[in-house]
Image (tube, rainbow, N blue to C red):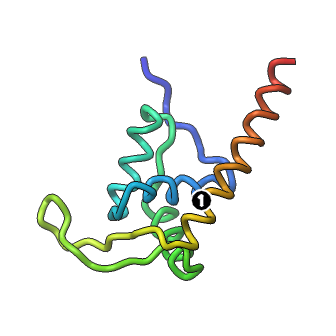
Amino acid sequence: MPEPPMELLQGTLDVLILKALADGPRHGYAVSRWVHERTDGTLQIEDAPLYKALRRLEQGGWVSAEWGVSDNNRRARFYELTATGRRKLRAEESAWQRYAWAMFRVLKA
């Protein structure tokens, strides 16, 4: 029986979104689906926090957004990393890798 999805740790949502957008523009549902699939269902992003974070990232200049049409022919807002967002993602990836390495070291002890 598969385990239920885990709660997102505080501070992880932004980096998950930025990473999901690293390959190109996506609408909100596609971001959520990418995270779910990439983590084999371990992480799941609820709609309200996702769209709140996307607005915050847009206001911060890390993503830009424009309206378009999704794969199922529906109007959707597509989000894309800006140059500032790419720099932020690189910094966040580095910080999370260091943090994860330190946590694994502690848990192995």
**Side (left or right) of 75 relative to 28:** left
Name the residue at the bottom extreme: 59
Instruction: Identify the residue at horizontal 69%, vertical 54% (top origin).
Output: 10
Quadrant in the picture for residue 86: bottom right
Q: Count numbered badges in the picture.
A: 1
Does residue 32 lie above or below 7 as drawn? Answer: below
Q: In x, y percent, where is residue 28?
A: 37, 63
The residue nearer to you, when weighing 66 against 91, is 91
Instruction: Identify the residue at horizontal 31%, vertical 73% (top origin).
Output: 77
**Side (left or right) of 62 relative to 66:** right
Q: In which quadrant of the rendered image does the N terminus lie? A: top left
Quadrant in the picture for residue 102: top right
Instruction: Identify the residue at horizontal 67%, vertical 55% (top origin).
Output: 92
The residue nearer to you, when weighing 105 against 48, is 105
Query: What kind of residue is marked 1?
Result: Leu
Q: Secondary structure at mark 1?
A: helix
**Side (left or right) of 108 relative to 55:** right
Name the residue at the left extreme: 73
The residue nearer to you, when weighing 49 against 65, is 65
Instruction: Identify the residue at horizontal 12%, vertical 65% (top origin).
Output: 73
Q: In x, y percent, where is residue 54?
A: 48, 70
Residue with the mark numbered 1: 89
Q: In which quadrant of the rendered image does the C terminus lie? A: top right
Quadrant in the picture for residue 14: bottom right
Near mark 1 (Cα within 10 A), the count class, few <14, some 14-19 or many ≥20, is many
